[in-house]
Amino acid sequence: MAQTNHTEQHTLIALVEDKPGVLTRVASMFRRRGFNIASLAVGNSEQPGLSRMTFVVNGDDYTVGQVAKQLDKLIDVIEVSDITKESIVTRELALLKVTTTPMTRGEIIQIVNLFRANIIDVGSESMVIEITGEQDKTNALNALLQPFGIIEMHRTGVVAMVRGQANGLATGYAGRCNGSVHN
Amino acid sequence: MELTGAEIVCESLLKEGADVVFGLPGGAVLPLYGALSSYPGIRHILVRHEQAAAMAADGYSRATGKVGVCVATSGPGATNLVTGIAAAQMDSVAMVAITGQVPRPAIGRDAFQETDVTGVTLPITKHNMLVMDVKDVAQAIHDAFHIARTGRPGPVLVDIPRDVLLGEKTEFVWPTTTKLPGYKVPGEAPESQVAAAAELINKAERPLIMAGHGVLISHAYGLMTELAEKAQVPVITTLLGISSIPSDHELNLGMSGMHGMAYANIAIDEADLIIGLGMRFDDRVTGRISDFAPNAKIIHVDIDDSEVDKNVKTTVGLVGDLKAVLGQMLPKVEANVHIDWLRHIEELKIQHPSHLVRDSNELLPQYVLQRLTEVTQGRGIVVTGVGQHQMWAAQHCKFTEPNTFITSGGLGTMGFEVPAALGAQVGRPDSVVWSVCGDGGFQMTMCDIATAVESGADVKFAILNNTSLGMVHQLQDIFFEKDYVASEYTANPDFVKIAEAYGIRGIRVTQQDQVVNAVQQAMETAGPVIVDFMVKEDEIVYPFIPSGQSVKEMLEEPAPGEPSSKSSSKRSSTGRS
Ligand SMILES: Cc1ncc(C[n+]2csc(CCOP(=O)(O)OP(=O)(O)O)c2C)c(N)n1
């Protein structure tokens, strides 16, 4: 489709039924339609029997609009919303295992403190650091720790929430069950 | 009373109005068959191959507007359904497939005939489910039928382990509602958008309606014709939209797209407004997207939100049930005449007469269909396979009633012609059903001629026998320097003898003057009949817009006397059986 929109990062949240196979359905849809998931996080929601998913998707407005519509079409998906343009909070948890020596340990601890991250395991030649925050924060910590040697990193993917009273879903994504008028 | 899972399936089928199922038993699903014998209200039609069960359910659904039901056993039985299910998904056909599964304790252990059928069919069903508790069976069947028939219809597969079908009994309680919190069915579209669409129509000078399968599914043909007549807007039908407006309606321009009428394609190129109704701007319809309707604004009405703006950028996109939306739109659309536009299209028809069949002494396939449709007077149902004969049927057969042209459009499934015709005939026993077959496709599913005979499905099979995979042959002719690898048959069976072997009548036609008589005889004969039309080989379907190209690259049939764009095949005549 001839579209000149540039690629940007979108954050989508979905409320889905907590049933076997839901994740497969979602993942299968992304794969077969050629959409890329930058990150995906799933967990229980405030309502029993329902889970919340947060997707970070890279794409232009057309692609992300398609992602939202295709997600919404899945029977087990109750609601989808592109909250990129809303006022939102996002968090991601990451664990990083870093190589340490008696020489570098002190400097690493300083960096960790600066980031208000936590050291949750210390070994003779490595330590495990826990960091929570927006993705940029983890990216920055990761960059600073690279020179020391990162043995392992595991990020959970972003979870997101709209600020204020709204539950994030009432807004809907552009065009949801509404069609569109372009001029 | 407490019932087994199998009995609950039968009770639920009756509640849903499913009185016919197509299937073939096996170990895992046998308990369901055990129950079927106590439910005379459900007619089971035993097929010869599960592929036919799915495709017969498809044909049944399209012919009747009801949900088609097919049944298969676990493993190979279920995987044999797959092609038919995929075809139903692509063409938005309401279908419920019920499969037996290995017993619950065996699941995940690679048990005998265990296949992860919900996994296999996940991308080719509207929805599917594995029912792990006998208490959930009734709800599952109820939900499956609801999903299959509402919104944009599609196939739903319900996989039931053997020990759920035949184990613990439970009280049969028919659910009063569906349990589908995430399932939405659009109705009307927002008024402001309908108004925006109506304004575009009122301002347009060269508008065109493009009518798809949705017009038939939504029963919107009456309102669509009203709209077309009120504003004098010509109507183009997609392959699946054929029969949504009578063929002889003066505003009907026929099919457009890859093998559509040249004048319809040119009209799209010149139009200033395209009104897409219940269609999805498939690549066979649009050709190269950047050159599709370059001068037009686009209104798109579809019940599936994800279709709007998917392939073409719309000016106004309306999500809703087509019949409801047209009901909203009609009062807002002003009466119009579009005299210049309609006159111009009449001129295009004269300049590009792609609906005419050239004079020839040979038995042209187009000629056969023209005579056939004259004899039936466009009444009854035409089912096709996939290939050249399908395109010629779409171009030359005439239709008077909705839902009378049944063809595998989206998936393009060869072999559809035999079982889908069987299903259509079972669903509409009073209609004459002609199955227009390719000799290739016919041989993929002709085992189910036996099913037609057994079930008294009075299908008339017209094989347009070119002793080749004609459409492939055509592509090789044009794009592969006539390298006819693997597209010519040298040992086709004698189809008249095949007919006789099944105990039915077979008629061979080799000349033009035999066509009408053969068609009449077939219709006068009780029971299925196979007519083997030995048509001219190496015929090309025109017009032709090659894949990924536009109307500017359209090939039209050379005028008589002009050199043909192709030379004759290098094959000898021994290919004839
Ligand atoms: C199941 C399947 N296999 C392969 C194809 C590719 N294909 C499309 S048309 C065609 C030729 C069909 O031959 P036939 O049924 O004899 O019809 P004809 O084109 O000769 O009218 C083939 C092989 C297909 N559409 N479906």
Image (tube, coloured by chain):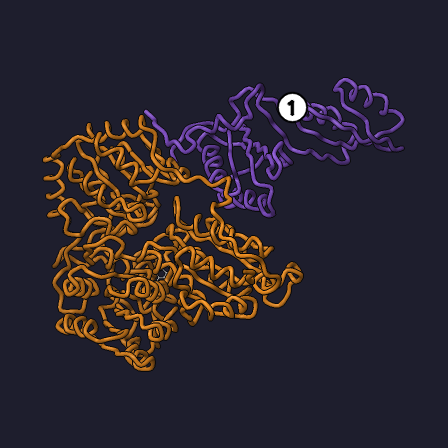
Chain colours: A purple, B orange
Provide residue B544's location: percent of width, then percent of height.
26, 52
Q: Quadrant of residue A18?
A: top right
Split into 4 quadrants, where in the image is the N terminus of chain B? bottom right
**Measured along the vertical axis of the image, is residue B362 above or below residue B357?**
below
Q: Is residue A43 above or below residue A141?
A: below
Relative side of B436 to A61, left or right: left
On whether ligand 1 comes within 8 Å of the CB at mark 1, the answer is no
Residue B422 horizontal/vertical position (percent): 33, 66
Ligand 1 location (quadrant): bottom left
Q: Position of residue B314 (x, y in %)?
A: 33, 33
Name the quadrant containing residue A118.
top right
Q: Which residue is mark 1?
A: A136
Q: Chain of mark 1?
A: A
Answer few, some or many: residues within 10 Å of disc 1's Cα (few below 14, many 20 plus, some between 14 and 19). Answer: few
Determine the residue positioned at 12% across, 63% down: B359
Query: Which amino acid, by three-letter code, is at mark 1?
Result: Asp
Circle 1 — which element?
helix
Residue A32 locus on image (x, y percent): 50, 46
Q: Residue at x 48, y 35 (%)?
A: A68
